[in-house]
Image: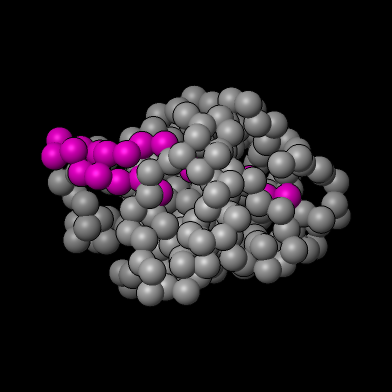
């Protein structure tokens, strides 16, 4: 059995216009489906615990509807606080996007500490769209930024300018580049996942399932060395 921890935003609004936000529903539902289909256990942590806000639920998307009506959504809505979770007990950690992470995950010191430790322990680490904001300012034990020299994708500047440029506090692509990331991208809104060692990042909502599948490929080559409880 493999265990995956999703770290999900607790932020419900963003920017000067108080735009309603949260996690982007597909970026939880689609990866969740892939991990569960592989027989993995998925747990959820948020910064505040409890029920996190979500954005862009579409009942016409069968995987979103499946997640919404299933055990996963109920468990997410009873999430534990990240401060109460031992991330070392998991085989992998995944951070979905939405605009919410740009509010809380972007600045949270526990998130930075967690992702750096996950990376240095040799666990699989994944993030998609705005989720890679979790990697910003995370420093390794050698003092270098985690993203420095790594091939990383995330929501691009071009995509942001056509989506939430008036709401976000900064451009994620530029911030990642400024900390030394070798930013990788394809055309806007196309699925794209990039693997650098045990780090997997995806460009946008369409990339969420691809990130999960790339994480699964890595996990299937690693021995089971961890355990987690619900």
Visible residue check, residue 138: no
Image position of 194 (left or right of 106): right
Q: Position of residue 8 (x, y in %)?
A: 49, 43
Specify whether 4 is left or right of 14.
right
User: Where is residue 102 shown, x and y percent of the image?
Assistant: 34, 40
At which x and y percent is residue 95? 52, 47
Quadrant in which the N terminus is drawn: bottom right
Residue 4: % across, % down: 67, 50
Q: Is residue 79 left or right of residue 10?
A: right
Front position in the image: 2 or 154: 2
93 with respect to 58 (left or right): right
Q: Is residue 114 visible?
A: yes
Residue drawn at (66%, 55%) of the image: 197
What is the magenta range? 3-23
Q: Quadrant of residue 101?
A: top left
> On screen, 47 above or below 22?
above
Q: Is 88 in the magenta? A: no
Vertical order, 23 against 58 (above or below): above
Q: Nearer the viewer, residue 34 or 92?
A: 34
Residue in the picture at 50% in, 56% down = 28
Q: How many marks?
A: 0
Q: Is residue 161 above or below residue 86?
A: below
Coloring scheme used: one colour
Who's the residue at 69% across and 31% down the image? 86
Of residues 66 and 109, the one nearer the viewer is 66
Q: Is the C terminus in the top left, top right, bottom left or bottom right quadrant?
A: top right
The structure residue drawn at horizontal position 65% and vertical position 31%, both measured from the top left corner, is 85
């Amino acid at each position: 059995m493999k265990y995956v921890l999703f770290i999900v935003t607790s932020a419900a609004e963003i920017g000067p216009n108080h735009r309603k936000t949260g996690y982007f529903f597909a970026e939880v539902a689609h990866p969740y489906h892939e991990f569960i289909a592989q027989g993995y256990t998925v747990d959820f942590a948020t910064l505040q615990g409890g029920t996190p806000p979500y954005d862009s639920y579409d009942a016409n998307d069968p995987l979103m509807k499946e997640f919404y009506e299933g055990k996963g959504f109920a468990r997410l809505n009873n999430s534990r606080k990240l401060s109460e979770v031992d991330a070392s007990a998991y085989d992998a950690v995944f951070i979905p996007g939405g605009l919410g992470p740009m509010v809380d995950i972007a600045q949270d010191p526990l998130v930075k500490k967690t992702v750096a430790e996950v990376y240095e322990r040799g666990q699989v680490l994944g993030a998609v769209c705005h989720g890679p904001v979790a990697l910003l300012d995370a420093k390794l034990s050698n003092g270098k930024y985690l993203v420095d020299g790594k091939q990383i994708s995330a929501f691009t500047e071009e995509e942001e300018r056509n989506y939430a440029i008036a709401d976000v506090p900064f451009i994620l692509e530029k911030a990642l580049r400024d900390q030394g990331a070798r930013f990788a991208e394809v055309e806007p809104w196309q699925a794209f996942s990039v693997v650098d060692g045990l780090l997997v990042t995806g460009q946008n909502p369409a990339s969420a399932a691809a990130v999960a599948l790339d994480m699964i490929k890595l996990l299937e080559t690693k021995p089971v060395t961890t355990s987690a409880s619900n």
